[in-house]
Image: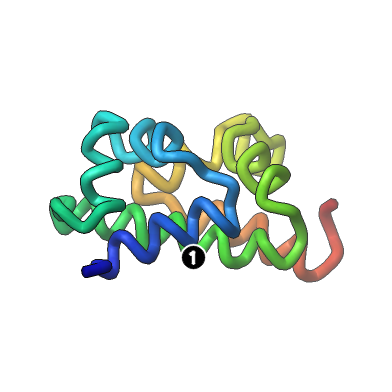
Amino acid sequence: MSTAVARILGDLRSRGGLQGKDVANIVDVSPATVSRWSKGTGSPALKTQTIIADLRYVVDRLSDFYTPDETRLWLHSRHPLLNGERAIDLINSNRTEEVLAVIERLDAGTYV
């Protein structure tokens, strides 16, 4: 039986090009743990579920502009509009709003 977290992880793979090891690095767990979540045999703590949900929202927004491979690279790259920080680090630090503000600029066509 597929859990909500397993479905989100599948969506992150298909729409964001993120592999289990990417998610593991973002939420600071082992790739084996992410694999268990993907199979529905485990569940992350609530804080981790929140990070994963934020990540999915960001990936959903980025998928309007980029392919899955480009989305993955965008998340892992340092950005001048994020003061040289990486989106994945900000999402893990509960600073998703800063990432979304940059994406809104993409949507408005002010930053490509």
Residue plotted at (16% across, 58% down): 46
Residue 27 image offset from top left, x and y in percent: 31, 40
Residue 108 image offset from top left, x and y in percent: 80, 70
- Categorize mark 1 by other alpha carbons within 10 Å: few (<14), some (14-19), many (20+): some
Above or below — where is 38 with respect to 29? below
Residue placed under numbered mark 1 in the picture? 57
Q: Looking at the rendering, which quadrant does residue 60 occupy?
A: bottom right
Q: Looking at the rendering, which quadrant does residue 78 occupy?
A: top right
Q: Looking at the rendering, which quadrant does residue 90 occupy?
A: top left
Instruction: Name the one closer to the observer, 84 or 107.
Output: 107
Above or below — where is 2 with respect to 55? below
> Total label count?
1
Residue plotted at (58% across, 52% down): 16
Instruction: Name the one closer to the observer, 52 or 31.
Output: 31
Specify the farthest residue to the front.
1
Residue 35 image offset from top left, x and y in percent: 29, 42
Would residue 83 be found to the left or right of residue 30 on screen? right
Label 1 SS: helix
- What type is the residue that disc 1 sits on? Tyr
Residue 11 image offset from top left, x and y in percent: 48, 61
Residue plotted at (39% across, 55% down): 9
Instruction: Name the one closer to the observer, 1 or 26.
Output: 1
| Coloration mode | rainbow
Would residue 2 be found to the left or right of residue 71 on screen? left
Q: Quadrant of the N terminus?
A: bottom left
